[in-house]
Amino acid sequence: MPQAPALESEPDPTVIESAKTLQLPTDYSRCGLSDKARKLAKLILQDDEQQRNLVNCNPLLAQLATNQAKALADAGKVSHFVGGSPNQRLLKAGFPLTEMDQARDNSVEAILGGESSADEVWLRFQMSYNHKIHLLGEHEYYLKQTEFAVGHYYKWHSPHIDYWVVYFAEADHTANNEQ
């Protein structure tokens, strides 16, 4: 479960709503590598409660999410720490996390196992307070996370059969300029 700073005050929903002009992807193929992953991506981004104004479906994150879903299936676990911490896995794969996120274990990943349909997964994520605020950007910290992807992996001979990984991350756009 992502770790967010504590809420200092509740956001004013009228301000967020009036400023909201959501730019959804027209092509969800970059959001996930399978039909199931793309369906969950669509459900998350098209939810009426989505607070982010702009989301970029990131092909690197789509590959990493799929790889992590497979790693979970192979391990037979639903754990953020299969293969190391989520933030460190993204860094090692070349995703430029912000300096603040580089110091955290997990501020980017939501995972679930055992549900076969994207609709069921989205319902389960919404029932979890921490996952909901992360995936819908209901906290200013998460609102900055606009790089997005979903991974899904199916493995019949594993405890949970279906494994899902969702990434929302903030990219450090200055990382390439400093080199």
Image (tube, grey):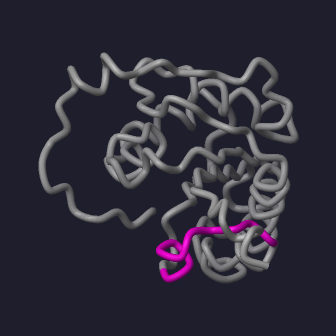
Residue 37 position, x and y percent, is 75, 37
Image point (44%, 37%), residue name: 136
Magenta stretch: give its range.
94-103
Q: Give the quadrant of the N terminus.
A: bottom left
Q: Answer whether residue 86 is magenta in the image.
A: no
Asked whether, in this view, residue 139 is left or right of residue 114, the answer is: left
Number of labels in the image equals: 0
Residue 152 position, x and y percent, is 76, 47
Asked whether, in this view, residue 3 is left or right of residue 175, the answer is: left
Comparing 155 with 71, the one in front is: 71
Q: Give the quadrant of the C terminus.
A: bottom right
Residue 107, placed above or below residue 161: below
Residue 52, placed above or below residue 151: above
What secondary structure is the stretch in magenta mostly built from?
Answer: loop
Residue 94 position, x and y percent, is 80, 71
Image point (83%, 37%), residue name: 30
Residue 179, placed above or below residue 139: below
Q: Answer whether residue 96 is magenta in the image.
A: yes
Farthest residue in the left direction? 9
Residue 71, placed above or below residue 167: below
Asked whether, in this view, residue 55 is left or right of residue 65, the answer is: left
Residue 130 position, x and y percent, is 36, 53
Image point (76%, 18%), residue name: 26
Image point (41%, 21%), residue name: 20
